Amino acid sequence: MHNLSNLLSIVIGIGLCLFLQSCGGDKASIKTAATAQVKTYMATSLDCEYQKNIAKSQRMKLVIFDPTGIFPEELYAKSPSHKIQHDILAQTDFRNWAEKKFDLFFATQDCPEGQYLTKEYHVTNYPTILLINKDDGRVLYKRDQLLSLDDLHRDLKLII
């Protein structure tokens, strides 16, 4: 009887050791999954193909709603949207800061994704800038007037 209880203790001990060892393996895989790189998106154009990535984004999104396709090309170069794209978002310091915080997209009216988001978020003025929460799609920031890089950067630093 005594040998049976010793044997049972040994089996339980071995089982416990194997269990604890397997838990350590799980922790390593959890750590690996937690540090897996999440793809980041930084818009460089108004391209419809790029806008398909809006749904794939797993981070906060800064979406600039643009009426591309509505204005003739010669008028667009003088538009507020053009100014935001070239004078604000093209700034290297801003883009380097932004890519650490959120994904950046343009949502244009000549692309299905842009049309959908315009309706979803009730955008009526152009350009409109929205910062959208990654978890529930809630709007964290909305601005629908032309602003400077300093204004945009200051506003976003207050929110993020």
Image: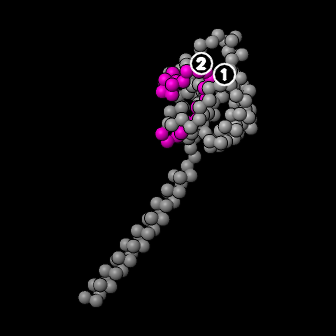
Q: Residue at x 31, y 80 (%)?
A: 8
Q: Position of residue 63 (x, y in %)?
A: 59, 30
Q: Secondary structure at mark 1?
A: helix
Does any portion of residue 11 appear in the rendered image?
A: yes
**Residue furthest to the left:** 1
| Position of 100 relative to 13 (above/below) | above
Please name the colour scheme applied to the rendered image.
one colour
Range shown magenta: 113-136
Residue receiving disc 2? 67
Q: Residue at x 68, y 34 (%)?
A: 152
Snapshot quadrant of residue 14: bottom left
In the image, taking residue 82 as reference, residue 133 lies left or right, namely left
Q: Decide whether residue 118 is among the magenta residues.
A: yes
Residue receiving disc 1? 81
Does any portion of residue 90 appear in the rendered image?
A: no
| Position of 96 relative to 48 (above/below) | below
Q: Residue at x 38, y 77 (%)?
A: 13
* Cβ atoms at labels 2 and 1 below 8 Å apart: yes
**Closer to the camera in the image, 30 or 97:** 97
Snapshot quadrant of residue 72: top right
Q: Position of residue 59 (x, y in %)?
A: 56, 41
Q: Identify the amino acid type marked 1.
A: Ser
Q: Position of residue 62 (x, y in %)?
A: 60, 34
Query: The C terminus is located in which quarter?
Result: top right
Q: Which mark is residue 61?
A: none
Query: The N terminus is located in which quarter?
Result: bottom left
**Closer to the camera in the image, 109 or 130:** 130
Q: Identify the amino acid type marked 2.
A: Pro
| Position of 134 relative to 105 (above/below) | below
Q: Decide whether residue 38 is among the magenta residues.
A: no
Pick whichever of labels 2 and 1 is earlier in the sequence.
2
Q: Secondary structure at mark 2?
A: loop
